[in-house]
Amino acid sequence: MTCIFVAGMHRSGTSCLTGIMQNMGIELGEVFTENEHNKKGNRENARITKTNDILLRLAGGSWNNPTQVREWNDAARAERDSIIADIKGAASGFWGFKDPRALFALEFWLEAEPDMKFIGTYRHPYRTALSLQVRDNTPIEKGLQIWKAYNIKLLQILETHEFDLVDFDMPQQDYLDDAIAKLIKLGVGGDKENAARNFFDASLRNQTDAPIEHIELPADVIDIYAALNRHFAAHKI
């Protein structure tokens, strides 16, 4: 039974992509289907996010100040293995999860699921930072630094595992066509395409109308965003 991990930064379409994936038959276990800042929930498993939070904290970091997780103990392994067993127990095919924090604890999850598959998502750094500001009053400058940290890690994982990205800022029809095609490419059943399309709601994309043409970004952020765009363009279906 294969695991699919949705890789990406907070407020960058991970919830939407995971919901689409779930509607295509991927088992996620018990996830949040409604949140204050996400009409259809963040589609995260509370046990997974708690485990990643603990790992980050023990490594000296947090979700908004992430650092690489390099060590974990037997208690963490036991909880991880219990989570995976519970989700697999309800699955008939693929199972999956999403938690942006897991970008920094990926080796921990790969230890249990070495054949894991990936699909990634990203969006414009300013729109991501603006969404963080609306959600938790994160200053734009801080939001851009968080975006930088997560997307540097995303690029590193892309180099190692080579998988497809979707661009959350794409027009709705193009986004759905692209995301569904890339999930089908992973082996997810295409017979549930209509259900996948029905998950999408335009209100899921906060700040989608925020103008970006004249936004000045730090040079290193521009470089990272350009690298993500190049990877996306090189792997169009």
Image: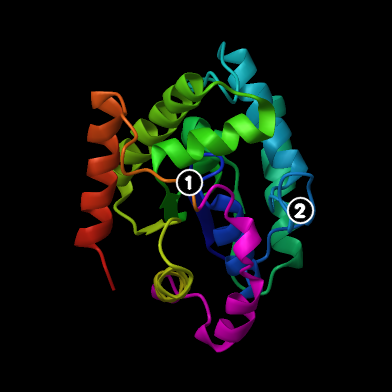
What amino acid does circle 2 point to?
Val
Residue 97 image point, x, y percent? 61, 52
Residue holding disc 2: 31
Q: Name the chief secondary structure element in magenta.
A: helix
Residue 83 image point, x, y percent? 73, 46
Q: Which one is in front, 28 or 172?
A: 172
Residue 135 image point, x, y percent? 67, 34
Residue holding disc 1: 210
Residue 24 image point, x, y percent? 60, 75
| Residue 99 placement, left or right of 127 | right
Q: Is residue 73 visible?
A: no
Work out whether mark 1 precedes mark 2 in sequence or the reverse, and give the earlier one. Answer: 2
State the residue at coordinates (72%, 26%).
Answer: 75
Question: Which of the image's four quarters has the C terminus?
Answer: bottom left
Real-space Cα separation, disc 1 to disc 2, in angstroms: 29 Å
Viewer-side label of 1, 2 = 1
What's the colour scheme? rainbow
Dot 2 surroundings within 10 Å: few (below 14), some, or many (20 or more)?
some
Which region of the structure is painted magenta? 184-208
- In terms of image quadrants, where is residue 109? top right
Q: Determine which of the numbered discs, if any, sits on residue 33 in the image.
A: none
